[in-house]
């Protein structure tokens, strides 16, 4: 059957002329290389009030530094013996912590910068090291929160050794935005070290939306693969919280069009807020922010003097089948938040905050995605070969469990209510399939799925996989926006949270032409897991990891040996291994698997979390619960 699939889905390759790309030049329109000149360094030194500065460079560069930095006391240092003979002090012999900052410049710039970071972090990780030159890579990310947030706590993790083999200490520039204000500081982190950034440490009183941002510049980071750097943060409001990761949109046109929509039913009682970034202050006030609530639309002018804005839409009777939506021009990465009052909740719970990063999606349904005869034939062949396209594995919890999970994709564009359900028992055995058309908007909880199926075998079901019924929908695969979310709810308080739902189109044992793995077809053939998030064990918070071992191939078998690794702020590791058979799931509560977790994490109660397996490509999400009945959800990610 695979031979037939390969014949039917033969890839049509178009020859496209490619211009040669110089080393360090922008890749795919998203540059990852920086230049840094003397005016930039001079402004940075002035910002921190630096008066005593080390200059790590050659003789000519030190002469340039004296001309460029009048009024600053400079000490020339170098690792080059010729420079030392010419009057420079040896870099290794200086008290780096006695200086306000260092500047690297001149020949052998990468070596100078790497050495300077190592020497500075040994004395004072908060003292910055600047550089003059070109060709350094950069990565960055921004994570925003609404003005209503009581606190934001973000974990910054130096992941570059784990994912890119970079063993150097790296300097991070951390920026905290509050409406028109920004505060900035620097921190050098050695491999696998992390830093907790708390909003309240920088802005005690707040009246604007906020954002935590982090950037890193270095001779080598991702080797031009991308510029993503993600904080993992918890946003607290009332007695609830949500967990998010950073967005990363840079170097785009301020005229870039952004559209996003979400189902109105996500707000049971309250409002939905969207943060709208303007970090580069390039937003144009000629373009307003259009907000849509059901059938009503309004436009507000841009506030070009602030770094981040917020648009809020109240539920106010918008029907369950209505949409919230926004259109604006700009870039930087938005986050959406549901803010619900106690009327939506139970057991005395006072509020619920849920959120995620926005996903680009037109507000109006597309009408140009009808499948043709060739598309429909492909869907039939895929199903006949034993594949399920883009299934989403949903955990089924026992009736008495505190938590329950749901699937939703009501913002899919075009609307796609035709679904397929597949159920599996505790050993991963396939119990059966049910197809149906969803007639009401709202979350599809696993209890609902089993009720719709109505089969006695449902009593054994421990995992459900939800996928679109492509044949019945009659839509093209390419260009479709699934907008799928996973939802978790506390059954007692009704507190809930959402995260982007990554499909189990993985562990296929082969590439299916025309339907690629989301990252690379090599991972469709030989799956592996290496993903990251954060672990908490403070203030009564518990971290669980939802490990979902799914596949788009029903005949897939195997057991994943999964390493759960918690790394504290100093970079020390604690590790445990669990097994997850195919088509099963496991909730791994870290404080149960690691009894000394709180001691390991120390005073901050926060650390980095790695989930790794060489056996299979797993979905992994972190669920965090509080003593007050709040629950937060966030998918883990790789780089």
Image (tube, helix red, strand yellow):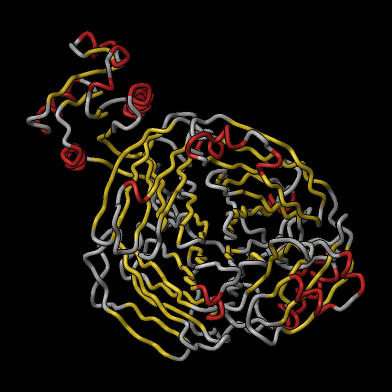
**Residue 351 place in picture, x, y as percent:** 50, 68
Could you say which quadrant of the image residue 491 lies in?
bottom right
Q: Residue at x 65, y 74 (%)?
A: 477
- Residue found at the far front of this picture: 348
Could you say which quadrant of the image residue 486 lies in?
bottom right
Q: Quadrant of the N terminus?
A: bottom right
Compared across the picture, whether 426 is left or right of 548 comes to right
Compared across the picture, whether 13 is left or right of 400 comes to left
- Regarding residue 244, the answer to whether it shows in the image is yes
**Residue 369 place in picture, x, y as percent:** 60, 82
Q: Look at the picture and state if 627 lies above or below 51.
A: below
Q: Look at the picture and state if 382 lies above or below 34.
A: below
**Residue 385 place in picture, x, y as percent:** 84, 66
- Residue found at the far right of this picture: 456
Q: Residue at x 36, y 25 (%)?
A: 111
Which sits in the foreground, 39 or 292?
292
Q: Residue at x 41, y 72 (%)?
A: 258
Q: Residue at x 66, y 52 (%)?
A: 620
């Amino acid at each position: 059957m695979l031979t037939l699939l390969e014949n039917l889905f033969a890839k049509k390759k178009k020859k496209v002329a490619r211009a040669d790309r110089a080393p360090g030049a922008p890749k795919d329109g998203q540059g990852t290389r920086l230049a840094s000149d003397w005016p930039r360094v001079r402004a940075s030194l002035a910002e921190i009030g630096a008066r005593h500065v080390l200059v790590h460079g050659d003789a000519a560069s030190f002469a340039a530094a004296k001309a460029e930095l009048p009024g600053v006391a400079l000490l020339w240092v170098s690792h080059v013996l010729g420079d030392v003979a010419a009057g420079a002090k040896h870099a290794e012999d200086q008290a780096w912590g006695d200086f306000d900052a260092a500047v690297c410049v001149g020949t052998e710039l990468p070596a100078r910068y790497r050495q300077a970071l190592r020497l500075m972090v040994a004395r004072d990780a908060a003292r910055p090291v600047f550089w003059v030159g070109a060709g350094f890579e950069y990565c960055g990310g921004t994570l925003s929160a609404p003005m209503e947030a009581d606190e934001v706590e973000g974990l910054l993790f130096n992941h570059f050794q784990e994912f890119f083999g970079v063993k150097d200490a790296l300097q991070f520039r951390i920026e905290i935005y509050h409406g028109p204000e920004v505060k900035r500081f620097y921190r050098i982190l050695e491999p696998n070290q992390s830093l907790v950034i708390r909003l309240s440490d920088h802005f005690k009183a707040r009246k604007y939306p906020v954002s935590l941002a982090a950037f890193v510049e270095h001779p080598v980071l991702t080797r031009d693969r991308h510029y993503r750097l993600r904080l993992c943060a918890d946003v607290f409001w009332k007695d609830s919280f949500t967990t998010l990761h950073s967005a990363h949109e840079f170097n785009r046109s301020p005229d870039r069009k952004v559209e996003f929509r979400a189902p109105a039913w996500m707000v049971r009682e309250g409002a939905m807020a969207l943060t709208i970034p303007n970090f580069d202050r390039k937003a144009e006030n000629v373009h307003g922010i259009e907000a849509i609530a059901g059938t009503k639309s309004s436009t507000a002018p841009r506030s070009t003097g602030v770094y981040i804005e917020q648009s809020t839409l109240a539920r106010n009777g918008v029907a369950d089948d209505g949409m919230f939506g926004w259109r604006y021009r700009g870039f930087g990465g938005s986050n959406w938040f549901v803010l619900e009052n106690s009327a939506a909740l139970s057991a005395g719970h006072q509020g619920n905050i849920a959120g995620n990063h926005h996903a680009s999606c037109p507000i109006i349904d597309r009408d140009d995605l009808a499948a043709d005869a060739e598309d429909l034939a492909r869907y039939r062949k895929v199903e006949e070969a034993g594949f399920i396209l883009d299934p989403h594995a949903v955990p089924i919890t026992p009736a008495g469990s505190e938590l329950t999970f749901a699937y939703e994709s009501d913002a899919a564009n075009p609307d796609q209510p035709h679904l397929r359900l597949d159920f599996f028992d505790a050993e991963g055995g396939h119990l059966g399939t049910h197809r149906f058309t969803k007639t009401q908007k709202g979350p599809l909880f696993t209890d609902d799925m089993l009720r719709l199926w109505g089969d006695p075998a449902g009593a054994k079901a421990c995992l459900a996989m939800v996928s679109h019924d492509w044949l019945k929908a009659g839509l093209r695969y390419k260009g479709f926006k699934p907008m799928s979310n996973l939802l978790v709810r506390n059954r007692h308080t009704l507190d809930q949270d959402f995260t982007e739902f990554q499909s189990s189109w993985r562990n296929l044992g082969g590439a299916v032409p025309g339907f690629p793995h989301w990252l690379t077809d090599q991972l469709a053939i030989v799956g592996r897991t290496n993903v990251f998030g954060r672990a908490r064990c403070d203030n009564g918070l518990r971290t669980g990891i939802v490990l979902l071992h799914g596949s788009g191939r029903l005949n897939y078998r195997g057991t994943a040996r999964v390493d759960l690794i918690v790394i504290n702020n100093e970079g020390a590791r604690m590790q445990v291994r669990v097994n997850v058979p195919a088509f099963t799931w496991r909730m791994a509560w870290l404080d149960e698997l690691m009894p000394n977790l709180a001691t390991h994490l120390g005073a901050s109660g926060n650390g980095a979390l790695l989930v790794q397996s060489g056996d299979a490509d797993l979905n992994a999400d972190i669920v965090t619960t509080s003593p007050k009945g709040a629950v937060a959800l966030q998918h883990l990610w790789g780089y």
